Amino acid sequence: MIANIVLENPKFIYKNFSGKVTQHNVKGMRNFCVILNQETVDAISKDGWHIKYLKNYKEDGLIPYLKVSINYNYINKPEIIVLSSDGKTILNEDNIGILDKVEIKNSKLIIRSYTYDKGLKDNVPANIIAYLKSLEIRDLFISANSNIGTVVTDADKKPVINDNDEIEPIKEKFIDGVAID
C-alpha cells in the first residue's frame, strides 16, 4: 500500500476546485496542482506517483508538481476545513469552488493514492492518481480583485453563497466607524 503524502504549506497552482470547463479540464472534473520540493519528489517518485515538471524561467531547471484530483463520488469524501478566529468552516462540493478565488497561505494537505492499473512498471505500481484526502486551511488571502467580498458564515458555520456561486459580502453600514442596522 502506498502511503499518503502530507504537505505543510504547499504552493497551489492551476486551481480548479469548482470543476469548471477550461482548456485542460472537462466540466465537473475538480483538481489542483501543488509544487513539490526535491525532498518530496525523491521520497514519492520511487512509489510511482505521476510527477510533472514546469520550466523554470527565472533560472535553469524544472519545477516539479503533482496534480491532485478531488472526488466527491467516493465513499470517503475529501474533508476541507477553513479555520478562523470564528471557528471552523467545513467546505463541501457545493461551495468548495470559492477556493479558486483565494490564495491559500497556511495549510496542511493530505493526498491519498489510487492505483487504477494493478500492473507494475519497473517494479513500481503503474498509473497512480493523486486524490485529495483532506485540506486544513489555517490562513488564506482574499485579493481586492477577487470579487468575493468577506467570508460570512451562518449559525452552522457554512459560507453564505449567493446565486452566482460567490461568497456574500458582509452588508453592514458604518457611521464614524460604528456599525448600524
Image (cartoon, helix red, strand yellow):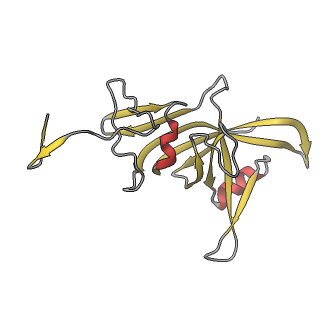
Name the residue rendered at 35%, 38% in the picture: 168
Q: Answer above or below: position of 12 versus 18.
A: below
Name the residue rendered at 17%, 42% in the picture: 173
130 horizontally vs 162: left or right: right
Q: Quadrant of residue 172?
A: top left
Where, quadrant-wise, is the N terminus in this rendering? top right
Q: Quadrant of residue 117?
A: top right
Coordinates of residue 42 in the picture (x, y in percent) = 72, 57
Name the residue rendered at 74%, 54% in the picture: 51
98 horizontally vs 117: left or right: left
Nearest to the observer: residue 150 or residue 2: 150
Coordinates of residue 113 in the picture (x, y in percent) = 72, 38
- Quick one: which residue is furthest to the left in this view? 176
- Quick one: which residue is furthest to the bottom in this view? 59
Coordinates of residue 5 in the picture (x, y in percent) = 64, 44
Where, quadrant-wise, is the C terminus in this rendering? top left
Nearest to the observer: residue 8 or residue 18: 18
Total tally of numbered discs in the picture: 0
Coordinates of residue 38 in the picture (x, y in percent) = 67, 61
